[in-house]
Amino acid sequence: MQNITIKGRVNDDELADLIGNCIGTIYIPRDEDFGMIPVESMAAGKPVIGVAEGGVLESVVDGETGLLMPGDPTVDDIIHAVAHLTQKKALGMREKCESRAQLFREEVFVEKMKKILQV
């Protein structure tokens, strides 16, 4: 598709520009415990197309903050998800994305760890 760009490693400024100007983020790593990219994307109000495994299951809510595909997606799975996540649908998910990302703020993490450690 002409509106998809595959990027490797980028600097922080380019990452901010890419996320700020995209419709959504495709995030399909293998064996990822927890990735920050989905949270960063949602914090910018952008939904995530991801795999239904690992940390993505914790951060992305299927149909609300993005779309989840099988753990080992085929090219057709990716094409279907991209076609399904129209700009209108992505904009409709913006508020939920921003709200969901707040659950992963540093302060929330520290507070949860204190409770676990009973500090």
Image (cartoon, rainbow, N blue to C red):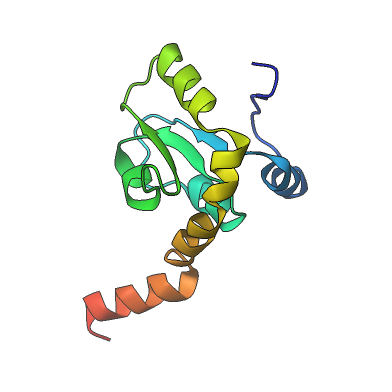
**Residue appearing at x 64%, y 24% in the figure:** 6
Q: Position of residue 4 (x, y in %)?
A: 65, 24
Residue 33 visible from this viewpoint: no
Q: Residue at x 45, y 13 (%)?
A: 75
Q: Which quarter of the figure has residue 44? A: bottom right
Q: Left or right of 114: which side holds 66?
A: right
Whole-percent x, y for residue 118 in the image: 22, 84
Task: Name the quadrant containing residue 87.
Answer: top right
Q: Is residue 2 visible?
A: yes
Vertical placement of 113 versus 37: above or below?
A: below
Residue 16, image x and y in percent? 71, 49
Q: Quadrant of the N terminus?
A: top right
Q: Across the whole image, how many numbered discs are drawn on residues?
A: 0
Residue shown at 52% from the left, 26% from the top: 82
**Quadrant into which the C terminus falls:** bottom left
Q: Is residue 55 above or below residue 111?
A: above
22 or 28: which is nearer to us? 22
Residue 88 found in image quarter = top right
Q: Is residue 46 left or right of residue 84?
A: right
Q: Is residue 96 above or below residue 85?
A: below
Q: Position of residue 94 (x, y in %)?
A: 56, 53
